[in-house]
Image (cartoon, coloured by chain):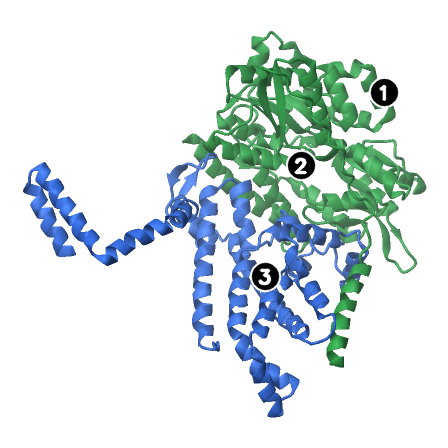
Chain colours: A green, B blue
Amino acid sequence: MNKVRIALLSVLLVMLAAVSLRTAPAALAQTPTPIPPVPRPEGSTEVVFWYGLGGNLGNVILQVVNLYNSSQSTYYVNPVFQASYDDTINKINAGLASGELPNVAQIFEAGTQRMIDSGRIIPVQDLLARDGMLDIIDDMEPAVRANYEVGGILYSAPFNSSTAMLYINRAAFIEAGLNPDEPMVTFDQVAEYARALTVRDANGNVIRHGLGVYPEGWFLEQIHAIHDTYIALPNNGLQGERVTRYNYNSPIGVQWVEFLKGLVDEGVAVYYGTGGGGASSAAFVNGQIAMHFASIASLRGLISAAENAGAGVDVGVLYMPRNPGATGKTIVGGASLWITDVGTPEQQEGAWDFVKFTLRPEVQAFWSVNTGYYPVVRAAYELPEMQAGLEAYPQFQVAIDQIRLAEITDRNTAHVSGIFVPYRTHYVQAFDRYFNGEFASAQEALDAAVAISNEQLEEYNLTIGG
Amino acid sequence: MENELSSVATSTATAPPLARIQTSLQLLERAWARPRNRELVWALLYCSPALIIFFFFTYYPFFRAIFLSMHITNAAGEPVRFIGLDYYLRVLALDGTGRTNYLESIATSFRFVLMVVPPVIILAVGLATLATARVRGIQIFRTIFTSSIAISLASAGVIWSLIYNPSTKATTWLVDLLGLPSPSLLANPSTALPAVAVMTIWSGIGFNFIIALAGMQAIPSDLYESAAIDGAGRWQAFRFITLPLLSPTLLFLLVIGTIGALQAFTQFHLLMPNAPNTVFVYETYRAFWYDNRYGLASAMSIIIFIILLVLTLVQYRLLNQRVHYQ
């Protein structure tokens, strides 16, 4: 019997040991207080609105909806959270068969082609023209407007727009004698920074890496845009002709992947794997890495997480890196509001009325200040709350400057494609396989990924043709 | 029956309408007179709630999937072009392009089964052996060993994603110990699958433990008493009494466990989203939800169905001969 007792005890001990090895993660996500909806006025027309942003960003969306609902009593916007951008477009796809579609949907730019192809949407430009409001389009941030214009038609109303940044720990920069205030950086500079920022202990173990690396299609698109290279042909799909093949096995695509791989191999960058964005930002706010790639929309979150972590990280931003002489600019990411043709004419009018409301300068300023996305209309910059926001967070100005670095061309505008989401996965997986030694070179990895993307693109285009 | 039908068929061809109805009524009456037929009708009636549900949620989707698997579909899931078995050939890498990504994921699924099923059964049987001990407070241990059954896979996945987070000490310690290139266990191809397997084993222990314990408690104690009189030790009793009499239970756990592990999805969805080298079911999900290739996803689900069917039949065939039923 004693042996049994010992065995039982040891099982218990193993479990206890497992518990004690665990320590609480440094920065746990804070759950935002829910925003209660305003009551629905009697006799109002319900407008169903699907959105895909959660957490604090989702809460600001609910605040915008409440602002709208209290501003008038004819329509009542009913916001329905769809868990993520991916889930929203997936549910739209499912809705195409069942007919269950919202009146307004927030869709990321990866869904643009699919939304157009759905045949169930009303182009925002038609509604603006009908109401004599086309001057709103002229006031839109040019890079943002270009992002949602396909073949010269603005299909959806830009709502939340951002771009990619290289986040830096300013304190570490100053400590290493580097300049954190010169945003324009080359690949070589970033490599030098990474080396200078990497800190080793007495035994040669790295305690801080220069850069965090994870595969992300959006960054690959940024690099192509900066270097005036189409990611999909012809013309990134923006001239009304469908893209028929992907081009991200281009020299610049290969250079980008090799650049990151080189830094990881050198030991000055650390690789967090697919879906490693969260791990990389956690490491950044905890001071375990000194540079991190992310959207400008993450700025507020990263600043408060860095404060909570208390590791002395001072969050700054630089432009995405480039080759000397590159003449492009980063592209805009984020989402826009799409109006569908479902429901009664009153509901469609209500949908349009709500979308118009979100384009107002004061709403855009409210949205921008509380989230970190750009205002999509430039008139918002003249409002005092927006100016106060820019003063409090000068990093935003860097991001705004970055999307204004060059004239808008199809090359530096997000492409449209029916397999936008899948292509990103193909890239991410090839990237990961190369980093894990399954491919001999980035060229080989990207060639393989492009072959899979093109196979699927061809199939998608076939289904649209009939 | 056949003769009756054919005679009625020939007679109705020439008979006037009224007579035709009469003959069919007679036929029905005659059929109803047979107790076997009556029973069949009643049986169908009683089973109809289940049959209707099965029809709409199992049989219809099943045949629809076979149909879709031979078509390219559009965004609304309607077939656009018939392509025969092209998708099956693509998945099984028989289409001549040398793209083996789906075939590899089938191999990954089988590796995952091997990593999960034998350990979880061995651990569960081990714990069940301990839990049969007559010591005070054994109920507490039984509760502890069972507890993982109460935690859904989704919650377990979230818990383990926190454990595997590179910023936790347990993970950092293990990564340093193994000398891994990336700080995340889930990002290294050599550790990702084992890490998910460990989580799955942990999650499955509760269920396997309960079944194994129930199986052990069903073994009559007089067998152990007589074995003890014959001088059998603890190990011999386990080896020659417990294991053989537990074999039906073990077969059940093996079959259920294999099917479960081959269909594992939640943990991969939570722990390794987007990762290459994932399991086949997750690839099927990706093909459906992310690639919107409903035809391809259907073909993949038919393939996993055939694999499961064959595997289960083989397991029963091979092992049934070696299983001792009382």
| Numbered circle sitting on residue B112 | 3
C-alpha gap between disc 3 and disc 1: 55 Å
Residue at 68% across / 28% down in the picture? A332
Q: Secondary structure at mark 3?
A: helix
Give the letter of the chain under mark 2. A
Sequence-wise first label, 2 or 1:
2
Asked whether disc 2 touches disc 3, contact meaning CB atoms under 8 Å apart, the reply is: no
Give the letter of the chain under mark 1. A
- Toward which corner of the image does residue A21 lie, by quadrant? bottom right
Give the letter of the chain under mark 3. B
Q: Secondary structure at mark 2?
A: helix
C-alpha gap between disc 2 and disc 1: 30 Å
Q: Secondary structure at mark 1?
A: helix
C-alpha gap between disc 2 and disc 3: 32 Å
Whether residue A299 can be seen here: yes
Asked whether disc 2 touches disc 1, contact meaning CB atoms under 8 Å apart, the reply is: no
Is A99 above or below relative to B170?
above
Expressed as whole percent of the image width and height from the top left, the position of residue B240 reads: 57, 84
Is B22 above or below relative to A71?
below
Please tell me how crowded label 1 is: few (under 14), some (14-19), or many (20+) other residues with Cα within 10 Å: few
Which residue in the structure is indicated by mark 1? A388
Q: Nearer the viewer, residue A247 or A64?
A: A64
Expressed as whole percent of the image width and height from the top left, the position of residue B36 reads: 25, 58
Q: Nearer the viewer, mark 2 or mark 1?
A: 1
- Name the residue type under label 1: Ala
